[in-house]
Image (cartoon, coloured by chain):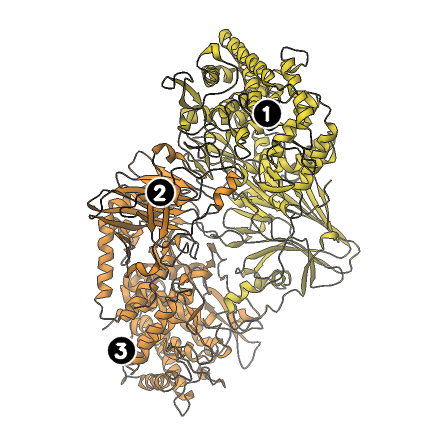
Chain colours: A yellow, B orange
Amino acid sequence: MPKNMHFNTQHPVFGAHACLTLGFPGARGGMDLERCLPPNQQILVALETADAPGEYEALPFIEAESHKELMRFISDHGEIWPHSAKRLTPWALEDVQRDFRLATDSWQAGDLRFTLYSPIGDVPDPANGDTTALVEALTPAVWAEVFVDNRKGHSSRRVAVGMSGLDPYRGLRQVAGDDGLVGIAEGAHLGILTREPDAWVGMGMDWRDILGEIEPASRTYALGSLGAICATVPAGEARTLRFAFCFFKAGQITTGIDTQYYYTRYFNSLEAVAQRALDDFDVAVERCFTANKRLDESGLSDDQRFIIASATRSYVFSTQLLEHDGKPLWIVNEGEFNMMNTLDLVADHSLYEMQHHPWTIRNVLDLYADRYCYEDEVASPDAPDRKYKAISFPHDMGVAGAFSRPGHSSYERPDLTGCFSYMTMEELLNWVLTAGLYFTATNDSSWIASRADLLEHCLGSMEVRDHPDDSQRIGVMRQDSSRCRSGREITTYDCLDHSLGQASGNTYLASKTWAASLILERLLGLLDRTDAARRARLQAERCASTVVSVTRPDGRIPALVGGQSQGVLTTVVEGLAYAWFGGVREKLSLDGPYADYLKALGRHFTEHAMRTDTCIAKDGSWRITSSNANTFPAKIYVCQFVAERILSLPVEKESRVNDAANVAAITHPEHSYWCWSEQIKDGIVYAAKYYPRGVTSNVWLHRN
Amino acid sequence: MPKNMHFNTQHPVFGAHACLTLGFPGARGGMDLERCLPPNQQILVALETADAPGEYEALPFIEAESHKELMRFISDHGEIWPHSAKRLTPWALEDVQRDFRLATDSWQAGDLRFTLYSPIGDVPDPANGDTTALVEALTPAVWAEVFVDNRKGHSSRRVAVGMSGLDPYRGLRQVAGDDGLVGIAEGAHLGILTREPDAWVGMGMDWRDILGEIEPASRTYALGSLGAICATVPAGEARTLRFAFCFFKAGQITTGIDTQYYYTRYFNSLEAVAQRALDDFDVAVERCFTANKRLDESGLSDDQRFIIASATRSYVFSTQLLEHDGKPLWIVNEGEFNMMNTLDLVADHSLYEMQHHPWTIRNVLDLYADRYCYEDEVASPDAPDRKYKAISFPHDMGVAGAFSRPGHSSYERPDLTGCFSYMTMEELLNWVLTAGLYFTATNDSSWIASRADLLEHCLGSMEVRDHPDDSQRIGVMRQDSSRCRSGREITTYDCLDHSLGQASGNTYLASKTWAASLILERLLGLLDRTDAARRARLQAERCASTVVSVTRPDGRIPALVGGQSQGVLTTVVEGLAYAWFGGVREKLSLDGPYADYLKALGRHFTEHAMRTDTCIAKDGSWRITSSNANTFPAKIYVCQFVAERILSLPVEKESRVNDAANVAAITHPEHSYWCWSEQIKDGIVYAAKYYPRGVTSNVWLHRN
């Protein structure tokens, strides 16, 4: 487990693009609704000190005392609130113990324990009609318990849970209606609410002013950016108080396609969310325990379980279940970059989604098929003026809540050779690979049948991007899309280096091409498209044999089949995971039809990638490519699974060292502010912060 | 006119709590929707340099070039967009001329002129059914023209208008539908739109990337926080392009009382706002010219007209016309403090509203009467255990979009003697004074009749706050509200000093008491409540004679009737404006029944307040009190009117010097970032920034 336990993590809500981020010291977490970075909100969890009335201690998620805000009002002439508490001190970090798990997170200090519950697990297809389970999963709340042990106390002690305001447009407000709810909310869209019978809420400019309040007459005061719910634990008693951190956003959520949150079918206000969340408290806790148990009993190492817990939370935060024209619309947002359903990531996330909510995969594939699929051309390499039609899918569906135009991503543009160029071949493969995962998870034959033509078009486009002339095909993409104009196609690794970032001839992309071809062989076969299935198989065979044929005598597989690159890639094996989970696991037999390819990959991996002068960094973490220290842990997680589980390579030791290095990086005392992140360079979080892709680590849970 | 013309001002939308703030150099203005401070957004208005294709100049509202945002994506490996413009330079400040008026604002540089139109004027009562005029007034847009003179140019020149993203939750998006609209928007809630036939929109991370774009194929790119609409001015031509800066916010706007914007009756999207705004462009321009003309031809000095233009804009920005249960609900928000319908300010703003939309006054008075009026007690000074019932109104209706609980403000709390204590007497007077203004403006007898009991209760409460025993009354408030508990009542000048901030015995408050008593005498008389009218008159007479009686032999009126304060107040005359505008102007005759009071006030003002060792600061600005350098210009504007116009005091010279000092302060090269502000100390903006109250300056327009 990590040395530093004071890291940020998201306590997420499924499908609400919302979480309570907490763990990093100071006002560095908070209730994040669509913000995609820690909101830097203060979260107060305070307890009156034993036998020191008017003195308080709090978890270290507040700011140092300040009267700055007060001074803005009182100018020259003001006075300190006469009922202010005497003292409020955060507990020292070393006095705070934390128990961090997949779906629960708990801090213990002094006589207080604060536990957050954020259920993670299966979510039923809304079309299936299991409304109870659906509403449980979609309730936009994080459940919180404060346990105070005052059994040895000689006086009653006040306990408080609160937050600072964070929205630049909306102020805090007190919730104190006649429905039993008491809380502190911001606008209509988020807040902390409770039904504890003695609870009351106060606002102010200094926590001490609220904590010290003695009279209900002051509790209508509503200036200041701080608000807290207070209650009392009598002397000689222990008490558990329950709160719900709730979110509720009504109205239009996205542009381009006009949507609303799916949960607004079931809730019409923040208060309604809170009532349901508090009603369902035990159910939520139980769902959390179930999720924890599954991971804790998985047999995985502490580091592996830590990675899964941390990364899965970041993924769940990024999810958005919306509704358009009465039908669900699923988005996974891309962390700090905030692009929507980025198709590279869809393929990654589907490795998790196929286990817990495969219907979201279909939802995304359908939107890509119906709105975003585009036609482009590739030129004949022999006669550049001769053009061949092909299809593919764009890189994403938009950014920051704005759906892009049909057929276009927000990311891609012409005349470039690196970042922001087109990922035409890679996204074509990603759609096919993801379709394979979906069908394997669901056996949804009617969906496959409805997409039969599209699947065959995908195959045809893979072929023509290899070579328009069947006799010259090698199973590897070489022809750039006409959308690139003077530029050239890239891969998802665009920012790493030119050889890996180039799509044409790429051996990383080859592994995905191989898996996609096998998946198409299977699906088209099931659809009785025998000839197409045969063509797909032929492409798989060509691909495998091309990679084998370009392997250097020393076993190194070059990054580009025709290139001079000396770089060594770990990710040449990545695509195998899609064959494994995409229904063609038998092709991965080391004495089967692709044995040469698989053995070549294995040899490359162990003899060339697993070296400290290539893809193993000083801290033991695995790199994507020997030519760049910037690594993508979520992709490495998949490669680890392929190496250990699929290819049965002897890399157990190196893999566990990588895990430890990754845990150290994502719990770094400074950079763990960003929760789970996907670009790490020499142990330092570098970019792609607050990122969903690490959910790929869940493949480790597949032990058979 | 000011030396520094590069100051921020709000180009406001009536009733939408929205404006385009612009004028301060750099990314220091922007489209402000409910934010209540300059959003620090870049506004691009750029023109390709004559005979230098690919080079651009822009108005100085953008930031220095930066690739910071790009680096976040491309990490190690990226390239500059190959079509990027060569150069983008803001024009030097000294090369930019500005023509600033009440409803238009125009910047000229090189061959470009950029003009903003934000109509200001009468707004019909929605109950009257003049929908055309109402929709014109409520259209949430600011109109913009870009005039480019390329008549001497030898090549066509690209012109661009754009903005940077500013919302932390929502990204920019391109508007390019099939309805003729082209624009750059943020979320569903704001944007710049046009119907210029050749316009297209681009996005990016550097303005130069957008300006340099050559191909429509790139224009789907949607990353980056910058977006601009581009068009072309052919060689040899001059061209005027029209844009609308539009706002549209759907759904719930406030909590406590659930409201939506009234304009959502007429518009269902940002695009619908833009269509109407562009349709109505000529109408909007005409409305602006009418508003400008009225002010320009008023005979007021340049400084006075500048103050009115600047302050009125700030007020209009702060207005919000909402709808609740099918009926209009009016809010004026309190600048950076953002409290709602602060009752001190309601009395000030009504001096303007009575001229242009008196129905908003009634709207606020009704909400105060129906939801916020509260009952308190005052103790007998002779027998503190004996309590007397009274009524009043709280300081405000809430803050930052959160309506406070019935009967309570967000601001007031017990046990204080300064800031945040209760303003019970002052708010009671403010309600009465404002009712007087409303009736004078409208002659709405049925409304007065409907509030007859309340008016009489107000009188009774004024009496009992003076003294429960009629025989001991002196016409001046002396008994604090029971809501203060151990504290004491304050006035709106709470932050200045203890003597002025104290309500009890306050001679500033006496002037409002005198005016309120006269207004009650008139209204209750019209309502045939003869005895009550007589009692009101008695209180007015007592008040006047008390102030006269405490006047020192040298003519100084002390701040407190019973106090030892040596302070000199300018604001002892403030209440006279309410008698003037509240329908009892005849009482202000210098040879009428209150001649002694009025003469005492005049002598105090000229001999004691108008001195450089008391209320005239070094820069010539007038102070509220000799004991504090922090002054409130909006209140001084009223005092200037009272001194010059009502009391005919010989203070013309001092008044014009004050104007000049005030203009200098609100155009200060640094502090004019905050637009019009209401607390200024030694020429420096101090607090109460971005504030609506300066609209009181419009009283200067009343010359007869």
Question: Image height check: is B70 above or below B100?
Answer: above
Horizontally, is B661 left or right of A328 in the view? left
Residue bearing mark 1: A354
Image spot of residue B330 (x, y percent): 37, 56
Whether A349 is drawn above or below B639: the answer is above
Task: Name which residue type carries label 2.
Answer: Leu
Cα distance between the residues tagged 3 and 1: 84 Å
Residue at the extreme right of the image, as rendered: A152
Q: Quadrant of the N terminus of chain A?
A: top right
Alpha carbon of mark 2 to alpha carbon of mark 1: how far?
Answer: 44 Å
- Letter of the chain that mark 1 sits on in the rendering: A
Q: Which mark is residue B586?
A: 3
Label 1, secondary structure: give it: helix
**Which residue position is annotated with label 2?**
B211
- Number of marks present in the image shown: 3
Q: What is the quadrant of residue B103 in the picture?
A: bottom left
**Which chain is mark 3 on?**
B
Q: Which callout, 3 or 1, points to the residue nearer the camera?
A: 1
Chain ID of residue with mark 2: B
Between A496 and B20, the one lying in front of the other is A496
Asked if disc 3 and disc 2 are in contact, CB closer than 8 Å, the reply is no
Q: Are marks 3 and 2 on the same chain?
A: yes
